[in-house]
Image (cartoon, helix red, strand yellow):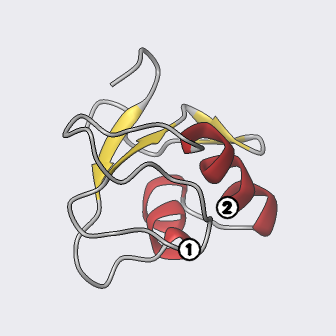
């Protein structure tokens, strides 16, 4: 995990919309796009599931959640 970010491991049933809402308290399309941009082409810690399609996330995939998305801060950055 990079400084100022939080790692979220995708579980079955997760959507990017739900992940953003859970960790930032609200969700907008620019925030979804920001999450995608922060993880575009990044291979997770298990060296799998690089994020190339913003509509496809997979259980077990690790996403880096930036400290802010479109001006919204992480609710619990130390978790």
Residue 8 picture location, percent across and down: 31, 50
Which residue matches tag 1? 17
The vertical placement of 62 against 64, above or below, is below
Question: In the image, what residue occupies the spot 55% across and 41% down?
Answer: 41
The vertical placement of 17 against 77, above or below, is below
Q: Quadrant of residue 9?
A: bottom left
How dense is the environment of label 1, judged by Cα within 10 Å: few (below 14), some, or many (20 and up)?
A: some
Question: In the image, what residue occupies the spot 40% across and 19% down?
Answer: 2
Which residue matches tag 2? 32
How dense is the environment of label 2, judged by Cα within 10 Å: few (below 14), some, or many (20 and up)?
A: many
Towards the viewer: 56 or 7: 56
Q: Secondary structure at mark 2?
A: helix
Question: Gap in Å between the C-alphas at discs 1 and 2?
Answer: 7 Å
Question: In the image, what residue occupies the spot 76% across and 40% down?
Answer: 71
Towards the viewer: 16 or 4: 16
Residue 37 picture location, percent across and down: 68, 44
Which of marks 2 and 1 precedes in the sequence? 1
Residue 64 picture location, percent across and down: 43, 39
Question: In the image, what residue occupies the spot 48% across and 37% down?
Answer: 42
Residue 45 picture location, percent across and down: 24, 34
Q: Quadrant of the N terminus?
A: top left
Q: Secondary structure at mark 1?
A: helix
Find out whether the residues at labels 1 and 2 contact each other: C-beta distance under 8 Å: yes
């Amino acid at each position: 995990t990079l400084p100022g970010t939080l790692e979220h491991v995708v579980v079955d049933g997760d959507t990017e919309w739900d992940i953003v809402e859970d960790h930032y308290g609200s969700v907008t399309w620019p925030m979804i796009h920001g999450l995608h941009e922060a993880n575009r082409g990044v291979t997770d810690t298990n060296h799998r599931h690089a994020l190339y399609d913003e509509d496809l996330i997979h259980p077990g995939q690790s996403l880096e959640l930036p400290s802010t998305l479109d001006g919204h801060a992480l609710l619990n950055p130390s978790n």
